[in-house]
Amino acid sequence: MRFSRWVAASLACTFAFVAVVLFGDWLIRSDVSPLHHYLLWHPAVGNAWMGINRGPLLLGFALSGNVHQPSMAGFMLGFVLQWGFLGALLSLFVVGGPESRTEWTPSPARGRSHSAGSKRR
C-alpha cells in the first residue's frame, strides 16, 4: 500500500505533535525532570496539566479497576489517543487537507525563450 504525500506529511505532523506533548508530560510529571524542583513550589502547573488530561486519567482508572491507582498503560493509551486526535486536527491546518492540493499545469508559453527583438509567427 502506497501513501500519498499528504497522508505521509499528516502522519509525520501528528507523530511530531504527540512526541512534543509526551516530552512536555515528562517535564511536568517526572521526578528526574529539570523542572522538578520548580514544580515542587508551583503545583498549579501540574494540577492544570492533569486537569487537561482528565480523560486519559479516567481511562487509566477504568482499566486498573482500582480507584486509588490508575493503570499507567491505560493512562498512556488515553493520552496518546487524546493528543493524537488533536495532532491530527492540527495537521489539517499545517499540512492542509487533501482537497486543498491543486495540480500545477504549465501554461503553453512556459519553457519558450523569447528574445526582446525577435517576433515569432
Image (cartoon, rainbow, N blue to C red):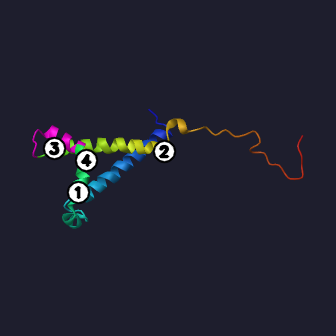
Q: Is residue 43 above or below residue 2?
A: below
User: Which comes before the other along the chain, label 3 or label 1?
Assistant: 1
Q: CA distance from mark 3 to mark 1?
A: 19 Å
Q: Position of residue 120 (x, y in %)?
A: 88, 43
Q: Position of residue 24 (x, y in %)?
A: 30, 56
User: Which comes before the other along the chain, label 2 or label 3?
Assistant: 3
The magenta stretch spans residue 19: no
User: Which comes before the other along the chain, label 1 or label 2?
Assistant: 1
Foreground residue, 40 or 91?
40
Q: Position of residue 88 (x, y in %)?
A: 39, 42
**Quadrant for the N terminus in the image:** top left
Residue 46 circle label? 1
Looking at the rendered structure, the kind of residue marked 4 is Asn
- Is label 1 or label 2 in front? 1
Q: Secondary structure at mark 2?
A: loop
Q: Residue at x 24, y 62 (%)?
A: 33
Q: Residues within 10 Å of mark 1 (few under 14, many from 20)?
A: some
Magenta stretch: dominant secondary structure: helix
User: Which comes before the other along the chain, label 4 or label 1?
Assistant: 1
